[in-house]
Amino acid sequence: MTANDSNFDQGSLLEYNGEMYKYLGNGWRATGEGYGWRMSKDLYFRCAGCGYLMNGNPQENDNCPCNKLYKDSDWGRFGSTLGGDAIAVYEKCQPEGALSK
């Protein structure tokens, strides 16, 4: 699966810049319990427009190259001009032999 594929199954793997990521679902519900988008450095968000994979670190601002996915940590804003359900949520896979925290 590549960053621009549009058909995903939960648990599918994505290779992006030589790293592996596990697909969790689309929209804010895929980020965990509670209401709204949960930001974490362990989560990654994929732009449906250009395939850019954005780190969910709540301390960093970011925009994808096509400006459809944005994160403004200073003001607590995150979203996509294509709608929240267009945002695919991933977590980074541990390398083989790595110890989990």
Image: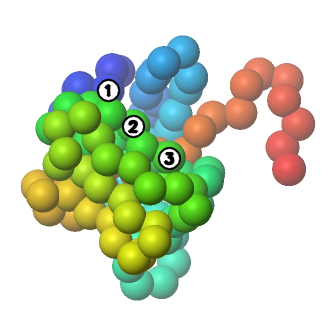
> The disc labelled 1 sits on which kind of residue?
Ala
In which quarter of the view is residue 50 placed?
A: top left
Relative image position of residue 13 (x, y in whole percent): 46, 29
Query: Residue at (63%, 34%) from the top-left corner?
Result: 93
Scheme of colours in the image: rainbow
Would you say 81 lies left or right of 100 here?
left
The residues tagged by marks 2 and 3 sit, at their Cα atoms, a distance apart of 7 Å
Q: Which mark is residue 53?
A: 2
80 over 44 or under it: above or below? below
Q: Residue furthest top?
A: 18
The residues tagged by marks 3 and 1 sit, at their Cα atoms, a distance apart of 14 Å
Q: Secondary structure at mark 2?
A: strand
The crowding category of the residue bearing disc 3, from other C-alpha atoms within 10 Å (few below 14, some 14 to 19, many at least 20), is many
Q: Which mark is residue 87?
A: none
> The disc labelled 3 sits on which kind of residue?
Asn
14 over 76 or under it: above or below? above
Q: Which residue is mark 1?
A: 3
The answer to whether the residues at label 1 and label 2 have Cβ atoms under 8 Å apart is: yes
Can the viewer see residue 37 in this picture?
A: yes
Of tags 1 and 2, the one toward the viewer is 2
Q: Which residue is mark 3?
A: 55
First-in-chain label (3 vs 1): 1
Quarter of the picture holding the N terminus? top left
